[in-house]
Image (cartoon, coloured by chain):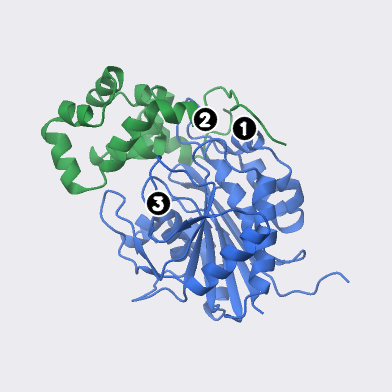
Amino acid sequence: MTSRISPDLPGTYVFDGPTSRRGLNMNKLFMSLRSETARTEFLADERAYCARFSLSEEQTAAVLARDWQAMLDLGGSIFYIYKLAMMDGLSMQYLGGVFTGMSEADFKAALLAGGRTDV
Amino acid sequence: MSEVIWGLATSHVPSIGAAMDRGLTSDPVWAPLFEGYAPARTWLADKTPDVAILIYNDHANGIDLDIVPTFAIGTAERYRVADEGFGRRPVPDVVGAPDLSFHLLQHLMDEGFDLTVFQELDVDHGFTVPLSVWTPDPGDAWPCPVVPILVNVIQYPQPTAARCYALGKALGRAIASFDGARTVGILGTGGMSHQLAGARAGFINPDFDAMFLDAIENDPEKLAALTREDYIRQAGSEGIELIMWLVMRGAMNERVRKVHAAYHVPASNTAAGLALFDNRVAQHA
């Protein structure tokens, strides 16, 4: 009934406690981007904004390079990472394409065809 | 004495609200979804309760990751519609029902559910999209006051499905002992199968969803017995949101009548489900 550790499911990120610890500062940065003022400050000097939130060098590099996969690996929550993607005008389908090695159009087509039922 | 008159379970995908806000509901991509909602909306139109309770989760809008309440309740007079980063949805703020909130809080606490209390809360799409599914054109105000109950489904370990179902049962007893309303509507939100991140992103499981849609009516204990690993594996890492439907179901009678159900793939990356139940049906002796 209960479980002590998060499950290890292939191809699946389980946002557990240690992951959330690792990504806390980065996720807080992403959450701040809800406000127009914060987005303006971020875009004016992204590296300085990352430093203000005490991101690690790896996290900073991932954010600056828009390396979405690395953001997940470094403790990002998809709901928080999405704030940065939205700021860039990118959709959740675009991110889905990145994570699965598909173009956004192919990823959307797969969903429209009934979703990825075989993974 | 208050009575739950209906339960509405629905997905809360942000793009469902966006499609409504942008007038895209007749667009070929969206029309099948909204056609599926129509019979439920028609049935609900003349059954506005005195108050509603809506079970949902926040998505990085009203709550940060510095505090992650497992279960929580709002006790405010009003809840502002959140700005999720692209402006507030053009829908009314939510009027709360503090008297009911405090009644539920005390009753649930006495039953062993130690809820976190939100005295201020901005409600995001997880809350406003289900209200829009119920009431597409609210005008200046939603049909009735609404009390938010929040469940952590984002950060592992989420509460078990069994605990959500038990919370619903206690919620049902708490509602029954409230003198301040006659009729109550209850909304369970989230799901159905979907996964946003990882190599399995885009995962949809129509077989699991069909099983769930049937069992939420007829055999909720079966769903309450599933582990969180079962949900993540079979419904996807975000499909675990479905445990919130069990809070709604637990607050309803043992026997309910399905008024309408709808299922559509996709709403963005998600299998969108809706199930509407009439709670006023004859019970077994």
Residue in the image at 70% along x and 40% along y: B226
- Tell me whether marks 3 and 1 sit on the same chain: yes
Tell me the subunit letter for badge 3.
B
Residue in the image at 38% along x and 60% along y: B120
In the figure, A68 relative to B208: above or below?
A: above
In the figure, B94 relative to A76: above or below?
A: below
Q: Which residue is mark 3?
A: B14
Q: Earlier in the sequence, mark 3 or mark 1?
A: 3
Q: Which residue is mark 2?
A: A14
Picture colour for chain B:
blue
- Secondary element under disc 1, as helix, strand or loop, is helix
Could you tell me if residue A44 is visible in this image? yes
- Secondary element under disc 3, as helix, strand or loop, is helix
In front of the other: label 2 or label 3?
Answer: 2
Residue B275 pos. (x, y %):
61, 60
Q: Amino acid at mark 3?
A: Pro
Picture colour for chain A:
green
Tell me the subunit letter for badge 2.
A
Q: Which residue is mark 1?
A: B233
